[in-house]
Amino acid sequence: MIYSIQPWNFPVYQPVRVLAANLMAGNGVILKHASLCTGSGLMLRDVCVKAGLPKGLFDVVIVDHETSDAIIEHKLIRGVTMTGSDKAGRHIGQMATKNLKKSVLELGSNDAYMVLEDADIDLAVETCVQGRLYNNGETCVSAKRFVVTEAVYDAFTEAFVAQMKAIRLGDPTDDDTQLGPLSSVEQFETICEQVKESLDGGAALLCGGTAPDRVGQYYPATVLANCQPGTPAYDDEIFGPVAAIIKATDDADAMRIANDSRSGLGGGIFSRDEEKAVKLARDHFDTGMIRINSFGAADPNMPFGGVKNSGFGREHGGFGMMEFVNIKAVYRP
């Protein structure tokens, strides 16, 4: 039995990607969903029951953190998979290790998207705006830091800010809305504090940064430039529609800045020379998943996961299905 601890930002997809891979591997799954979306977990269980999934292969628990720890310790739990913050991941990873349980941890990141000297600027700007605002910016693998070489910095920044300023903030049920509210009061307050600390630390505000006077946890598309090490915009994951632009002297410096992070989940490289970009991604970019001249959240046929403080293990693809199986050797004369 695998214990699955999942976040709120993709309330059906997140538990499904764990459930699908493990059912195919022959494992049952117990889901503890985030407190913001327990109803999504219960709905998924009901769908599986109606579809004919045998009783006991998938169930949902609504429990506090102390009880969750006890579930990890239970003898029938053989593995633990979790997506969330690095703080929660450290605790859950320690609990699993203490009880000799295999774990897969996906812990978010401050993904760098590099715009190299030979980048197609129009493509880079359009893609980076999409990558930053996807799911209101509340995506672990979204584009967050934009490391732009000096040769194209002014052109990229001017166009990027113009597109971010034009984003329509509003009710997510309206057809014209491009950016909706954040998930909670807590998330809104965290974003406000991270932006303030980044500005106090030397960042420049190019657009956004002030929440509108309206009901709901709305935060505008925001761009910070001159982001400095030691501030949230440079070091941390900002889980909302806030972009951090960092100037690099050249392509080599851009790679240095991109790797200057305790995290490493995803990232991107924009260059007209795709072979060069692939070589940089393969040999030098210290992160788990890299997009060349594109953005995407996840592909079911490709392994999903990170390095460093972004966790370990993989979901999706054949790699994901093999995380919670054991190799058995049988010898015969």
Image: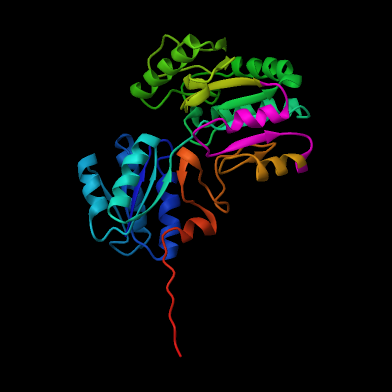
**Image point (35%, 46%), residue name:** 93
Q: In the rendered view, does 158 fall on the left or right side of 3?
A: right
**Image point (53%, 59%), residue name:** 318
Q: Nearer the viewer, residue 133 or 237?
A: 237
Confirm whether residue 292 shows in the render: yes
Confirm whether residue 85 shows in the render: no
Q: Nearer the viewer, residue 271 or 25?
A: 271
Residue 324: x and y, percent?
A: 41, 60
Quarter occupied by residue 187: top left
Residue 85: x and y, percent?
A: 39, 35
Q: Is residue 267 magenta?
A: yes
Q: Nearer the viewer, residue 93 or 196?
A: 93
Q: Nearer the viewer, residue 208 or 54?
A: 208
Q: Residue furthest bottom?
A: 333
**Image point (68%, 35%), residue name:** 269
Residue 271: x and y, percent?
A: 75, 34
**Image point (29%, 36%), residue name:** 35
Number of labels in the image equals: 0
**Quarter of the figure that contains the N terminus:** bottom left
The colour scheme is: rainbow
Placement of 85 over or under 148, stated as above or below: below
Quarter occupied by residue 152: top right
Q: In the rendered view, does 185 fall on the left or right side of 291?
A: left
The part of the chain drawn in magenta is: 248-275
Placement of 256 over or under 297, stated as above or below: above
Residue 51: x and y, percent?
A: 38, 59
Q: Is residue 273 magenta?
A: yes
